[in-house]
Amino acid sequence: MDAKQTHKAHRVRKAGASAKKGKKSAAKGNPRAFAMQSGQRADRMARRKAELAEKKFHVPMADRTPTVPAPLVVAVVGPPGCGKTTLIKSLVRRYTKNTLAEVRGPVTVVSGKRQRLTFIECGSDISAMTDVAKVADLVILAIDASFGFEMETFEFLNLLQTHGMPRVMGVLTHLDGFKDNKRLKTAKKNFKHRFWTEVYDGAKLFYLSGVENGRYLDREILNLSRFISVVKLRPLAWRSTHPYMLADRVQDLTDPELLEQNPKANRTVALYGYLRGTHVKERDRVHIPGAGDYQLSLTEKLPDPCPIPDKERKRLDERHKLIYAPMSEINGVMYDKDAVYIDLRKTRHEEKAQGGEGEKMLAELQAVAAAPDRLAAQQFNLFSGARPLAAEAVRRPAVFDDLADPERPESGSDSDGTGDGTGDGGSDEEESDDDDGSDGDGSEIDSEIDSADEDDILRRIDAVQVDSDAGSDSDGEPKQRLAPVHTGAKRVNLMKLVYGPARSKPGPGDADADMIKPPAPADDLELDEDALRRYFITSVSDDEAGGGSGGDGSEDDEAGFEDLEAGGSGSGSGDDGDDAGDDGSENGSDSESDSDEREAESLGVPADKLKKLRRKFDRVYDEDDEDGGKSSFYQQQKGELQKLVDDTRLEMDELAAINYRWAGEYVKVVIEDMPCEFMQGFDPSVPVVVGGIPNEEGLSLTTLRIKRHRWFPKILKTGDPIVVSVGWRRFQTIPTYFMNDRIKNRMLKYTPEHMHCSAAVFCPYIAPGSGFCAYFLKRAHRFGIAATGSVLENSQEIDIVKKVKLTGFPDKIHRHTAYIKRMFNSSLEVAKFEGAAIKTVSGIRGQVKKAFGTSGVFRAAFEDKIKASDIVFLRAFHTIPIKRFYNPITSLLSVTSMRTIAEIRRAKGMAVPNKRDSHYRPVERVAKRFNPLRVPKSLQAELPFKSRVKHVRADEGAPARAVVMDKHDRRVADLLGQINLLHKDKARRQREKSAKQKAEYAKKRAAEQDEADARRNKRRKAHFRREGRNQKRGQE
Amino acid sequence: MSKRDVVQYEGHQFLKQRLVLSVLSQQAVRIDRIRPDDTNPGLRDYEVSLLRLVEKVTNGSRIVISPTGTSVVFRPGMVTGGRIDMDCPVSRAIGYYLEVLVALGPFGKEQLVATLRGVTMNNVDLSVDTVRTATLVNYRHFGIEEGVELRVTKRGAPPRGGGEVRFICPVVRAVKALRFVDAGRIRRIRGISYATRVSPQTANRMVEAARGELNRFIPDIYIYTDVYRGAESGLSPGFGISLVAESTTGALLTAELCAAAGDAPEDIGRGAARLLLAEIARGGCFDSAHQWLALLLMVLGPEHAAKTRIGKLTPFSVQYLRDIRDLFNTTFKLRPDPASNTVLVTCLGTGYTNPADDPRRKMSYNQGGGGGYRPYEPSGGHSEGAGGNPYAPYLSEGNPRSDSEGRGASTKAQKLRDEIDHVVDIMNENIQGVAKRGQDLDQVQDKTTKLRDDTQLFRRSAGNVRKRMWWKNMKWKIIIGACIVLIILAIVLGVVYGKK
């Protein structure tokens, strides 16, 4: 036992209270050591701190998260075979103790006391990935560790980035494939770091080490679920300004009769789901990515199928752990207006094995459910030629019409109240009351109205107000008791008068209703001076209770504020009056604590808690203003935004009465005129998103700031159709790339390789600043995302130009004037270009002056004499038309898309056109022969000596003279000649020898190379065979 | 995929608002039965001009008018803004056209600078004074404050007009949500009494009459008189008065009256005052002439609940609400408030953002002009009035909205601006100094050159004089010498010839 026993080392706390405590004590113990040492350094530190603080500021965004938010959309994304389904099954099992047989469509579960999750699976189809990227709140990227990262993962990350980055977690699966522990460790580390570079440093990556009973290990899933439960979301700009819904159930409501007649008839489709983002309303326009733009013909709030437990509990009860996944066909009986769904709470496998008799009957009943409808639809002729008899005279009960009636809920609530009779009957009475009412107050307006109908309307409106006055004054007690109902009835009336079905037709006559001011002969106005006085600041304020509009309004406000202060109890607008009364009494000497207690009592909250809340509120809303500076301005902006959001919450009930549906509600929306392909080819595993598009339907030319993705192997060509995903939409369009050079937009034939450029595309409006992502419909490369960027602006025209160079040749040259031919073909063309700047190749500038004759020759003036061999250029810019092509990708229906020219050629087996002019030819440059320079004698005489041509020496360049050699000389010359000859011969032989050696060596090298090539090919072949096998295995 | 249907309307009424809403909602409209039974069927000249104006202020709009002129199909383009110059037919006042520009101007691609010529006031449309002193001031509730300007360069009374205004409207990215429920109490009344091509006394008489009516309620009344003469006074004589009552919370209630032939100024003044009182009695945060503006900008606001209080709904507003419902699919919640006899109006904004807004030029907004829009700043090159400056800015001080919102920012900005001004001043001085020094140097050089020339001249002349004097001197010497030689010669010759 020599080996020392090692204990686990103490780990010093790096964060938290104890860590802080340690630090503080260090400074305390030796204060001098921590005193300021250098002013400069302190200055720098302060600056740096300020900089960091500044960086943290964002433009404040309104957080519209409802009090009961819709379930979090958790998207599990990854290429096929990486364990997405297993993961969802494991998580669902963890939350609900339910085992899903299959995961089809969104699965909603209650995951905690205050949290619900909607799981959605997304494969590697780019359309599905795009849609999921737009709605997911939390993304779990499943990565197959045995295979490595796949391109889909990166593509998806890019999609996320361009559509507002949600939270991202990674999950590493298939880790049981690693036998060697060390290799596993390195692999994990490598994966983690690669993941961090892509997402952010410290992004969560979970390791799922194995599968047990078809699920991941419970411990690991529990860990993952804990991280999911604490995930914090920040509002994303696009999603917090647009309503959207992830459909978790799709129902075909088309009349079966109609379908029998025409199976291809357009369908009426109901889509169910939680509404997120903002609000919707009937008749709103929506976009369904993959299906197009539609109008909501009905929006209806349904009871939440998967509610959060209504009472605050310590922990989630077993019976509240609900699951809702209509497309995956699991548990429960579900009633709804269109159908009853009975499910047997059993997996398929079991169902097959032991289907009892009762269950079978149920199943059969379900199968026949449609039959009565069909029966009802049948008709038969009693006599030939007679009108056919139908089983039911009226086919469909007006279920939808009934619901569509905006007044329906109102009247329902009325009937609950006690005084509904008087309230409802009121409308008639009031109209009859009108006449006596209008004599007084309404007379002024009678005179100003032209058409009879408007007169009527106005009188009625007036009457409502007059009546309300009279009611509050005279009737006294009984009316006061029924006050809310009464005002409710009135509210309906005013709404009805304005929005009711009886629309006034404009009367004939030319008098204009466009008059916005009340023009009146003012003399016969009767003004009640005493009543008027209270509208002025000079009046005594004792009649405030009497109700000057100002006093009233402020009271209202305070009441609203009081509610807020009390911790958003949401006591509603109903008892505003009471609150206001409270306020009044509070104003005086009553101590605050007293009133606090009273409030606390009424709210059922402990008084000290309320106090704490109040202090917190004061701190947030009041004290920040005092310290001044930027933070307070920022806080103020944030506070204002928050106040708007809160105010909107207070109005929600009222607005819901006019059919607004709010985020967080479970709604059903009905869409008519949906093409039949939507239902016929419906695949639950493809997400259906319904996105609201307020003010985003007009088509325009949109300028995008675009950059080719650095992983995309090619640059993009102007005119090649690409698919752009922006906002909710995915559409194919033909971009024209261009760049602005401060003066004009120059067209680019191709995008730059590593730079941003602009692109003009034809598409519906998109809010400037939205991010987008572009890809080709047909994936031709390993990485699919072709470009990313953001929207700059929408406009109806963009002036994009390309350069046109016209060339011409001198015809006749005078001194500074030349006649240029072959640039234009007629004098008319010349006339268009009069005054245009031209230039020769040598850089002499000039101007087009006037046409000469009719053949297109023109006179031009130059700054110097041009040469006959010069070419004259005219540089012009031509505006190019932008192709107006917008093709929404209908991936949920059937896809028809435009192909690139290259694709068409490939499909049709056409060769690239071979133009003679496009060929490269060898450039032949004829050596230019210049005449010798001759300087005239007179000029030469005047030149300075330095520049003058000097006299050449007489013997220089003169032919050698013939030499008659003597004997000795001749012998010497002979000898030298012989030596030379020998030398040359030697050199020649050496050259020949070395050439031979070289040839031999080359031959040898070639043989070696051949051998090496053969070896390499063999190795390669083996490698690729192995690779292919791996890939195939991976896909399986 | 279902396409949006063209929204169909009938009748010539409400053409203006339908065009505006159509442009903003990007929804095509078709208007049929435009005066089909009239002796003069179809569009009137001012309606055609209106269509033309909308076409000018937008880009890509397509307007198809049937051959009879009784139906119009309007497919909207996008608002561009920019410079617009238009002669408006005199059958309607400039206010009629301005309403369109007021609604569309902030949502253009670039700043709108519109010059409109025609009738500046009549009894049908808003006068330019009311637009200037109330309509454009109401913009501020929606966050459009800086760079708004309306300048009345010429006044033109009906029937012949001849007036001219210049309207400048900045571009905004989005308007603010309106929460304006407290109408407050009237704290002061301002107004403009204008007269053109009539006795200047007329304006004062109107003021007297109006004050007579209003003084019973509030002492803080100031009505500016504005008399136009000469080339600025248009082609026809006329006068009128426009009154604005401002409440403690910044609500503006307006009334105006313009004289017809034969009206006495007193009647006009009194009538306008009574109209104003009637307007005050209606209550609300927006008067009946500006309900439409509030409704429109509420719909265009962000996705919050916008809420305000208005007096009785005018038939115009009722139709406006319906048209908004048709084109924006936004229904307002209307709740009558029996206590104050007003209507509380609530709606959810559609989150409209200016589609032509380029995020790159984000910072260049709202930089034109210092301070907010001041309705009572000098409007023309023209000032005359009862006492002192007739255009004293009155809305900038003590306005609670501007107080609560932009005080800190504006003082800071003001400080910065002051500093910049100071630096600019110094730089100007420096540049002037440098220029002056350059001038001095030039002068010195000139002087030296001149001196040099002078010396040369002097030297030359001195030389000449010397030569001349020398010659003079020499001449005498030569003459004497010659005489002596002659004498000697004569003596010698005499001696020689004498001997012979």
Image (cartoon, coloured by chain):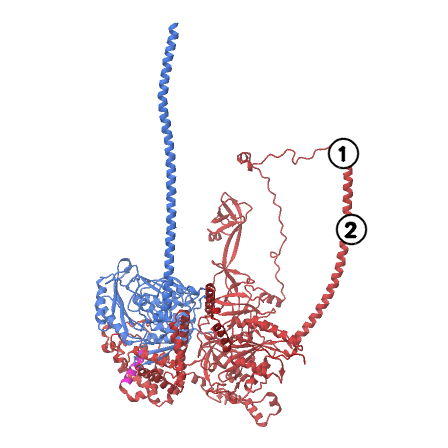
| Residue A607 x %, y % | 39, 85
Chain A: give its colour: red
Numbered tag placed on residue A993 in the rendering: 2
Q: Which chain carries label 1?
A: A
Question: If you read the primary sequence from the N terminus, does the residue marked by circle 1 or circle 2 appear first?
Answer: 1
Q: Which chain carries label 2?
A: A
Depicted A861 relative to depicted A592: above or below = above
Which amino acid, by three-letter code, is at mark 1?
Asp
Q: Which of A347 and B94 is in front in this view?
A: A347
Depicted A743 relative to depicted A627: above or below = above
| Residue A755 x %, y % | 54, 63
- The quarter of the displayed image where residue A217 is located: bottom right
Q: Can residue B9 be seen in this view?
A: no
- The quarter of the displayed image where residue B174 is located: bottom left
Q: Which chain did the image draw in blue? A: B
Q: Can residue B338 be seen in this view?
A: yes
Mark 1 element type: helix
